[in-house]
Amino acid sequence: MNPIDRRTFLRGVGTLMALPVLEKMVPTSALAQSVTKAQQPTRMAFMFVPNGVNMEHWRPAAEGLLPAELPQVLKPLADLRSEINVLTGLTQHHAFANGDGPGDHARSTACWLTGVQPKKTAGSDIRNGISADQVAAMHIGKKTKFASLEIGCERGGVSGDCDSGYSCAYSSNISWRSENTPVAKEVNPRLVFERLFGSGDATGETESRTRRDLFRQSILDIVSEDAAKLKAQLGKRDQRKLDEYFQGVREIEERLTKFENEKTAQLAAGIGKPTGIPGDYGDHIRLMGDMMVLAFQADLTRVCTFMFANDGSNRSYHEIGVSEGHHDVSHHGKDPHKLEKKQKIDQYHVQQLAYVLNKMRSIKELDGTLLDNSLIVYGAGISDGDRHNHDDLPILVAGRAGKTLQTGRHLVYPNRTPMNNLFLSMLDRVGVKVEKLGDSTGKLQGLF
């Protein structure tokens, strides 16, 4: 039997559901030999956390293989130790003031993926550089439904002064399509879900959502006829893979509905306001992470940015016993009580990262797992929140880039090594050949 098209979608009213890579999509000869990079692409994600970290509990003690006992902040990744690399010494030089005075939170956010000094302005004349994710999107984005996906867990403004004379556009965005065009992130998980599976027909999409709400249907019910026809063409392994994918989609829908019902009940009781966002921060991060994984699994996009929060965020973390604001705690002044609370917040963030990476590792692809076929950067634009320094940044790289990256290591680079050297190497790994990005000085040695 002939293979089915890789870009096959299941269709229903207002709905286009992309599919994971199935054996039926690959010629038998390719399966018998080896799956090509075109058939099993490498995905890239950039996951940003605010206000630096407690570096004493982040940095492994020695260079080389990661120890069995990881530092306190990284302990949630113990079972994933063989899937990650910790990178020390990388710097975003243009996040420093360099004569521009205060505003480190805004600069570090804007500069994190660009390596360019953002123009200090609170007006509309913003100027930055093109970010690494958007360079990738320009080159490989045409291969997928979405060139890139931008998500986060904290809204941000696009105008006004958010940090010592810097526009809110700087402190709210790590993704920049051009020097004066940030790419806004979506923080509502329901809107991300509907976008991923929307047909592009506004009327049809509205009808689809109305029907599902009215009859308590899943999006899978909308495409059930197409799904039945497809399954009839598949072998047992592909059928099982499709069932696992559908189960994942249904679980996400059920969680979305649960959070929305809870919010409706709160509103009826006069509590809160309509946002469509889970009240629990961890639930919010994990749900947005699931959206990213779903988009990668179905090859809806190969490029994603994910901001856990905007830099300078002063969110409190009552769920882990930290009632003070994150930004306030990050200015610890070496107070041991504040440092302990900062370590708890940092570890909490890493717990959410571990959830996402474990989900990616659980998804089997034609050659390895989704995590094997990804490059995930996790880290901050500030090292020590008290010092506001942007050298020796806390950076972690997860995934094996199609089994071409040796993992399980602590790689130490000379301090002030441009972080954009890492991005240049990552872009090269996904087939994007650029000679320079921001302040890069060449590819990062020893990683691949």
Image (tube, helix red, strand yellow):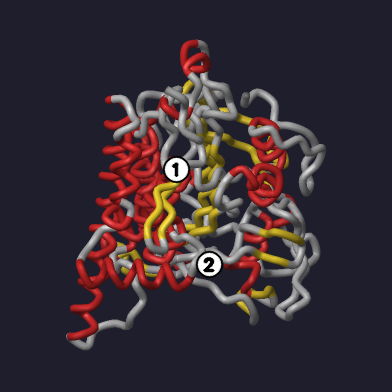
| Image position of 320 with respect to 43: above or below | below
Total tally of numbered discs in the picture: 2
Seen at 59% across and 29% down, the residue is 38
Q: Residue furthest bottom?
A: 270
At label 2, counting other C-alpha atoms closer than 10 Å, the crowd grade (few under 14, some 14-19, many 20 or more) is many
User: Which amino acid type corresponds to the residue marked 1 in the rendered image?
Assistant: Ala
Q: Quadrant of the C terminus?
A: top right
**Side of 380 relative to 281 (left or right):** right
User: Which amino acid type corresponds to the residue marked 2 in the rendered image?
Assistant: Gly
**Which is nearer the N-term, disc 2 or disc 1?**
1
Seen at 80% across and 64% down, the residue is 99
Residue in the foreground of this view, choosing between 269 and 117:
269
**Side of 281 relative to 90 (left or right):** left
Instruction: Give the labeled residue for mark 2.
Output: 312
Seen at 54% across and 29% down, the residue is 39
User: Which dot, 2 or 1, sits closer to the camera?
Assistant: 1
Instruction: Give the alpha-carbon distance from disc 2 to disc 1, as whole Å.
Output: 34 Å
Seen at 45% across and 60% down, the residue is 198
Instruction: Give the labeled residue for mark 1.
Output: 298
Q: Quadrant of the N terminus?
A: top left
At label 1, counting other C-alpha atoms closer than 10 Å, the crowd grade (few under 14, some 14-19, many 20 or more) is many
SS assignment at label 2: loop
Residue in the foreground of this view, choosing between 66 and 36:
36
- The image shows residue 269 at horizontal and vertical percentages of 17, 86
**Side of 233 relative to 269 (left or right):** right
- The image shows residue 165 at horizontal and vertical percentages of 69, 77
| Image position of 139 with respect to 172: above or below | above
Snapshot quadrant of residue 103: bottom right
Say if mark 2 contacts mark 1, CB within 8 Å.
Answer: no
Indicate which disc residue 286 carries. none
SS assignment at label 1: loop
